Image (tube, rainbow, N blue to C red):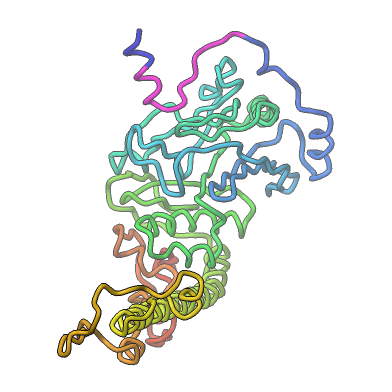
């Protein structure tokens, strides 16, 4: 029994079963009114987005025109770890990625009030050999690898999912992001080891930002691909088949990327300038400290109080045991760089990344399944323009 309990704790938020009727609670009246206000219905399909750094969970509902509208934003009470994907059993990280929740993943008898299993590891996670199980969105505001909500909030989310299933939705998507994937946030984390992974997530994030419809998600070449057309099947670990995107969506993505690349590069420049300023300030502090050391040595050599005139008034000047100074025993200061030489030493520049293209690091971090730009498109791109290297080639 002790070994079993220990394995459950390591597995994540694996709930014990407690029989109760919490799962049958209706959608609150106020939330029903909000559903009507956004032009949706209680049994319309549900979509959930999670943002770790902001600690929020968004519930979206499909409206009459087929797009999704934001219904409500819930604060996440607690999540484990920090931004970045879950990779190993016991690392106490909450998952990031694209997951689907079926009725079988809903747990009405959770010891964490109510819960649903995120579905980690999915095909993408398994392609990297990532391990872990029983990763939940649940109540009780306590997490060890999960996303924990207050009980009242998980009751509403659970009811929304239950009603969507009753309306015919076979699975509702849960897309978990490290943060809101703005160019400024991407620039801030551009030096992190998970940057290429986050670029891949941003592709799916952008699809929804443009269409307001959750993207169709596939996995090939150990990479998420979104809204792919013209391919019969995908294998998570095999090369990607030939596919394309809707031309209208492709054009919208290219326009968005062009705008966001400018913002990304501007944010990188500000970030580098701030670092250079901080480095210069640190260097000035070091020079001032060296100057103080030299001044103290000089005062000691002259038999004065090393803390200066004011300290001497308060503490008294130091006494000496010698009655007469030794004639040729002057104290030689330790050789060191002068303050001027230290101040003139060049400040190391933080340096810009090899390429400032918003998606430049993706190809070097993970194998890119995407084709290059068309030859006529390549000819129109100058050497100092930012190019898009993560969009599939449109079929002619």
Q: How many marks?
A: 0
Which of these two is toward me, 369 or 121? 121
Residue 302 x/y as whole percent: 31, 85
Left/right placement of residue 28 relative to residue 230 reads right
Residue 68 x/y as whole percent: 68, 47
Part of the protein shown in magenta? 6-19
Residue 134 x/y as whole percent: 44, 26
Residue 333 x/y as whole percent: 23, 84
* The N terminus: image quadrant: top left
Report if residue 253 lies within the magenta region: no
Q: Is residue 367 above or below residue 110?
A: below
Q: Is residue 113 above or below residue 315?
A: above
Q: Is residue 259 visible?
A: yes
Report if residue 17 lies within the magenta region: yes
Q: Please, which residue is most extreme toward the left here?
A: 328
Q: Is residue 31 above or below residue 83?
A: above
Q: Is residue 387 visible?
A: no
Left/right placement of residue 123 relative to residue 136 reads left
**Quarter location, residue 384:** bottom left
Q: Residue at x 63, y 27 (%)?
A: 165
**Quarter location, residue 249:** bottom right
Which of these two is toward me, 126 or 88? 88
Q: Residue at x 38, y 55 (%)?
A: 194
Which of these two is toward me, 93 or 68? 93
* The C terminus: image quadrant: bottom left
Left/right placement of residue 38 relative to residue 168 reads right
Q: Residue at x 54, y 71 (%)?
A: 260
**Quarter location, residue 21:** top right
Q: Is residue 391 above or below residue 11?
A: below
Which of these two is toward me, 44 or 336? 336
Q: Residue at x 65, y 37 (%)?
A: 46
């Amino acid at each position: 029994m002790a070994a079993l309990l220990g394995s459950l704790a390591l597995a994540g938020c694996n709930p014990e079963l407690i029989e109760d009727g919490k799962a049958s609670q209706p959608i609150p009246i106020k939330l029903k009114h909000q559903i009507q206000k956004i032009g949706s219905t209680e049994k319309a399909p549900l979509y959930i987005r999670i943002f770790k750094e902001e600690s929020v969970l968004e519930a979206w509902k499909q409206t009459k025109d087929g797009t999704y509208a934001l219904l409500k934003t819930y604060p996440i009470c607690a999540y484990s770890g920090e931004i970045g994907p879950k990779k190993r059993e016991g690392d106490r990280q909450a998952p990031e990625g694209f997951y689907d929740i079926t009725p079988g993943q809903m747990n009405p008898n959770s010891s964490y009030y109510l819960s649903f299993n995120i579905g980690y590891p999915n095909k993408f996670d398994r392609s990297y050999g990532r391990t872990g199980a029983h990763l939940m969105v649940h109540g009780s505001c306590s997490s060890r690898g999960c996303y924990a909500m207050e009980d009242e909030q998980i009751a509403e989310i659970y009811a929304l999912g239950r009603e969507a299933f009753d309306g015919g939705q076979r699975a509702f998507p849960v897309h978990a992001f490290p943060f809101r994937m703005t160019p400024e946030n991407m620039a801030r984390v551009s030096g992190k080891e998970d940057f290429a992974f986050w670029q891949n997530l941003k592709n799916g994030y952008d699809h929804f930002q443009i269409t307001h419809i959750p993207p169709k998600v596939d996995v090939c070449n150990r990479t998420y691909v979104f809204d792919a057309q013209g391919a019969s099947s995908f294998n998570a670990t095999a090369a990607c088949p030939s596919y394309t995107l809707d031309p209208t969506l492709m054009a919208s993505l290219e326009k968005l990327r062009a705008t966001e690349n400018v913002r990304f590069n501007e944010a990188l420049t500000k970030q580098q300038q701030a670092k250079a300023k901080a480095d210069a300030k640190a260097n000035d502090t070091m020079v001032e400290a060296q100057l103080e050391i030299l001044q103290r040595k000089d005062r000691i050599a002259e038999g004065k109080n090393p803390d200066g005139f004011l300290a001497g008034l308060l503490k008294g000047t130091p006494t000496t045991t010698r009655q007469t100074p030794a004639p040729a025993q002057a104290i030689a200061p330790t050789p060191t760089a002068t303050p001027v030489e230290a101040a003139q030493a060049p400040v190391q520049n933080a340096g810009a990344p090899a390429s400032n293209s918003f998606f430049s690091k993706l190809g070097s971090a993970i194998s890119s399944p995407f084709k290059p730009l068309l030859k006529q498109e390549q000819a129109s791109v100058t050497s100092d323009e930012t190019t898009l290297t993560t969009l599939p080639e449109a079929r002619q």
